[in-house]
Amino acid sequence: MKTAIVRHILVKDKDTAEQLKKKLQAGADFAKIAKQYSTCNSAKRGGELGEVKKGQLVPVIDKLVFTAAERVLHGPVKSQFGFHLVEIKFRMDF
């Protein structure tokens, strides 16, 4: 079974996502940015989604999490909920 440790930030518009991505790439603390800006319930945990199984996330994010490079900031990625910035900490296959 495929699982991954993931954190993300969800915002309503692409411009905000792009601005936050620039801040993160410049060294801003992911957890602080998530707590301040993310509209997801995970914001209170610094954007931590924890361990997720393949198929648990919305399809576009699920595909990203299980195919994209680890330890890289991905996004903005659009879903029906808004725009996501996603970091895959690591994946496991067991």
Image: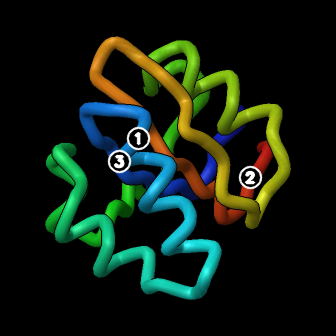
Residue 72 found in image quarter: bottom right
Q: Please indicate whether residue 32 sits to the left or right of residue 19 in the image.
A: left
Q: Residue at x 50, y 49 (%)?
A: 18
In the rendered image of this protein, does residue 62 appear above or below residue 11? Answer: above
- Where residue 3 sits in the image (x, y, percent)? 64, 43
Mark earlier in primary sequence (3, 2): 3
Tally of marks: 3
**Of callouts 1 and 2, which one flags the residue occurring earlier in the amino acid sequence?**
1
Residue at x-position 35% and y-position 77%: 31
Circle 2 residue: 91
State the separation of the CA atoms marked 3 and 2. 28 Å
Q: Which residue was labeled with disc 3?
A: 16
Report the front residue among 82 and 44: 82
Residue 89 % position (x, y): 65, 64
Q: Which-is-in-front pick, marks 1 and 2?
A: 1
Q: Helix, strand, or loop for circle 3?
A: helix
- Name the kind of residue labelled 3 in the image: Thr
Amino acid under disc 1: Asp
What's the distance in space between the residues labelled 3 and 1, CA to CA?
4 Å
Residue at figure coordinates x 81%, y 32% from the top left = 67
- Quadrant in the picture for the N terminus: top right
Residue wearing tag 1: 15
Dot 2 surroundings within 10 Å: few (below 14), some, or many (20 or more)? some
Name the residue nearer the viewer: 63 or 33. 33
**Disc 1 on helix, strand or loop?**
helix
Q: Is residue 50 above or below residue 64?
A: below
Q: Are marks 3 and 1 in contact (CB under 8 Å)?
A: yes
Q: Marks 3 and 2: which is nearer the front?
A: 3
